[in-house]
Image (spheres, helix red, strand yellow):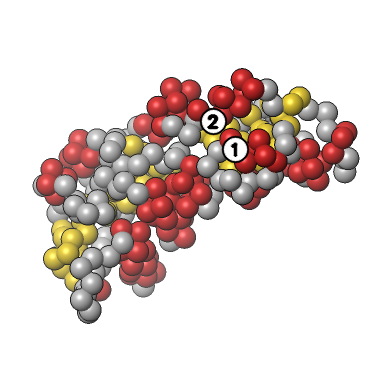
């Protein structure tokens, strides 16, 4: 255990502050090929993963109390005060630690042929995408393929909503028509009208397409869908939140597989 005044790390510089703050914007994340992860829980999971972490920033008190977190870290370790740390990212309540991680190479590539999972067509809300990643993790769905217009996985709000699940689910961004045209696996899509989900046994492996919050699945992507499925409606609500619909579909999908 260290005392806070014994932490042997350099202080965060104004230049580094400017760099980390710039990563709030997608264009800078893409330009630098890095993103930020905030909070003790998420950073702990990050450091235990295969992600490369070039920068770790913590308060002296936090670093002193958690030497196991940084003792095997190969990147730069910097210290700063709570106010500055909270100002760096999107999580203003973060008074512990922040990391800068490298975006993995698979993010901008189509998944390998053996992959299967969810296809996300133009989801725009960060909370929805983060929740969908978390749902996929919960139901052991290994892969998510996103259209280029889907919100960036490394948006801080997406990462917070995923609760660390982004570390365990492979998320790819690629043009969907070309991807769906080339896959050999069945492609199903969620619609307001279609085959009753509860009377359907979705094949596995397969791809299940989830559409935009307001417009649904785009016409171009619809042309590659081989089976339309719908969650039966018993009340008068016009639609379901995209993440909620995804959870219902994934639950049915996995229960059907477990029954053989």
- For mark 2, give the secondary structure: helix
Residue at figure coordinates x 88%, y 33% from the top left: 6
Residue at figure coordinates x 31%, y 58% from the top left: 242
Residue at figure coordinates x 35%, y 42% from the top left: 151
Residue at figure coordinates x 72%, y 33% from the top left: 80
Please identify the quarter of the rendering in which residue 63 is found.
top right
User: Residues under labels 1 and 2: Cα distance?
Assistant: 8 Å
Q: Depth check: 105 or 84 in front?
A: 84
- Residue furthest toward the bottom? 234
Q: Which mark is residue 115?
A: none
Residue 164 in the figure: left or right of residue 149: right
Query: Does the image show residue 47?
Result: no
Q: Depth check: 145 or 121 in front?
A: 121
Please identify the quarter of the rendering in which residue 139 is found.
bottom left
CB atoms at circles 1 and 2 under 8 Å apart?
A: yes
| Vertical order, 1 against 239 (above or below) | above
Q: Which mark is residue 21?
A: 2
- For mark 1, give the secondary structure: helix
Residue 54 lies, in percent from the top left, at 61, 27
Residue 51 in the figure: left or right of residue 241: right
Please identify the quarter of the rendering in which residue 52 is found.
top right
Q: Which mark is residue 87?
A: 1
Q: Depth check: 31 or 80 in front?
A: 80
**Which quadrant of the figure contains the N terminus?**
top right
Q: Earlier in the sequence, mark 1 or mark 2?
A: 2
């Amino acid at each position: 255990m260290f005392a806070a005044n014994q932490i042997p790390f350099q202080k965060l510089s104004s230049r580094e502050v400017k760099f980390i703050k710039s990563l709030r914007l997608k264009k800078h994340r893409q330009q630098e090929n890095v993103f930020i992860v905030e909070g003790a829980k998420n950073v702990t999971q990050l450091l235990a993963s295969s992600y490369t972490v070039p920068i770790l920033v913590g308060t002296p008190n936090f670093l002193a109390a958690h030497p196991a977190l940084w003792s095997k870290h190969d990147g730069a370790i910097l210290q700063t005060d709570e106010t500055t740390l909270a100002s760096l990212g999107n999580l203003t309540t973060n008074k512990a630690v922040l990391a800068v991680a490298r975006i993995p190479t698979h993010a901008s590539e189509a998944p390998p042929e053996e992959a299967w999972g969810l296809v996300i067509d133009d989801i725009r809300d960060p909370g929805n995408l983060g929740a969908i990643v978390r749902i996929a993790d919960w139901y052991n769905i290994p892969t998510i393929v996103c259209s280029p217009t889907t919100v960036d996985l490394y948006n801080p709000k997406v990462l917070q909503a995923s609760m660390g699940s982004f570390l365990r689910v492979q998320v790819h961004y690629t043009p969907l028509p070309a991807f769906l045209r080339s896959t050999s696996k069945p492609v199903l899509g969620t619609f307001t009208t279609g085959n009753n989900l509860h009377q359907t046994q979705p094949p596995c492996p397969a791809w299940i397409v989830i559409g935009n919050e307001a417009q649904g699945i785009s016409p171009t992507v619809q042309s590659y869908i081989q089976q339309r499925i719908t969650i039966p409606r018993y009340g008068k609500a016009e639609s379901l939140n995209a993440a909620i619909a995804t959870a219902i579909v994934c639950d049915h999908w996995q229960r059907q597989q477990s029954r053989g």
